[in-house]
Image: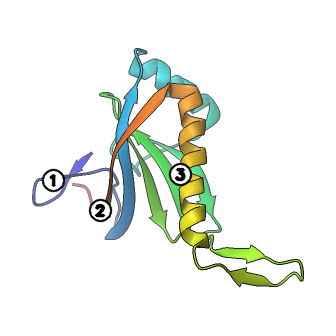
Amino acid sequence: MFLKADGTKVWLRSSSRLPYLVLGGVIESSEDYEIIRSRLMQVYELTSGIASDDGFLMQEFEDRGALVFCMRPDKNCAFLLLGKFDYGLEKQKSGMEKRKHDAVLANLFGVFKRSADEIARHVGTIRFEYVQTELAMTAA
């Protein structure tokens, strides 16, 4: 994590002020961090310089945003939702798109759930502990 000016920690490093959503927790596994890291590197693209420690690109959302899984050597981990998440449109039989009142929320939950299940197959159980908004800042 990076330290913000007020001393609190932040997962993401950015050249500009970038708000993002964090779903954070801990990987509950007896395996060594390096073993977990090597497994994830076989399956996901490692992003460099975006996260405080290791960041793996899980999904991109039509050039508007992304979901990144981050973890630290102490096995603390987080999903970072970056940018705009706009999965609220659903195709109708007529080919038209219609927005359901709860589609964005339901789809966001589904993306987090599928991603967490996918990561868990490679690293073991993840115990999620919090959801929080953050503001990334330039790292020194």
How far across and down, in percent of the image, does residue 118 sit?
60, 37
Asked if marks 3 and 1 touch (Cβ < 8 Å), the reply is no
Left-right relation of 135 to 97: left
- Seen in the picture, residue 33 relative to 108 is either above or below; the reply is above
Q: Among all residues in the image, which is located at the extreme front?
A: 101
Mark 2 and mark 1: Cα distance apart in space: 10 Å
Dot 3 or dot 1, earlier in sequence: 1
Residue type for callout 1: Thr
Residue 64 can be seen in this image: no
| In front of the other: 16 or 81 | 81
Find disc 1 in the rendering and name its residue. Answer: 8
Amino acid type, residue under disc 2 in the picture: Glu
Q: Is residue 94 above or below residue 108?
A: below
For disc 1, the neighbor class at 10 Å (few under 14, some 14 to 19, many from 20) is few
Q: Quadrant of residue 135?
A: bottom left
The percent coordinates of residue 68 (x first, y second) are: 49, 50
Hey, what amino acid is under mark 3?
Phe
Query: What residue did someone put label 3 on?
Result: 112
Q: Residue 127 lies in what quarter of the image?
A: top left
Find numbered disc 2 in the image and state the secondary structure of the residue it sits on: strand
**Residue 72 point in image, percent of width and height:** 34, 34
Q: Tell me which residue sits at (60%, 63%) in the image.
A: 107
14 vs 79, left or right, is left
Q: Which residue is mark 2?
A: 134
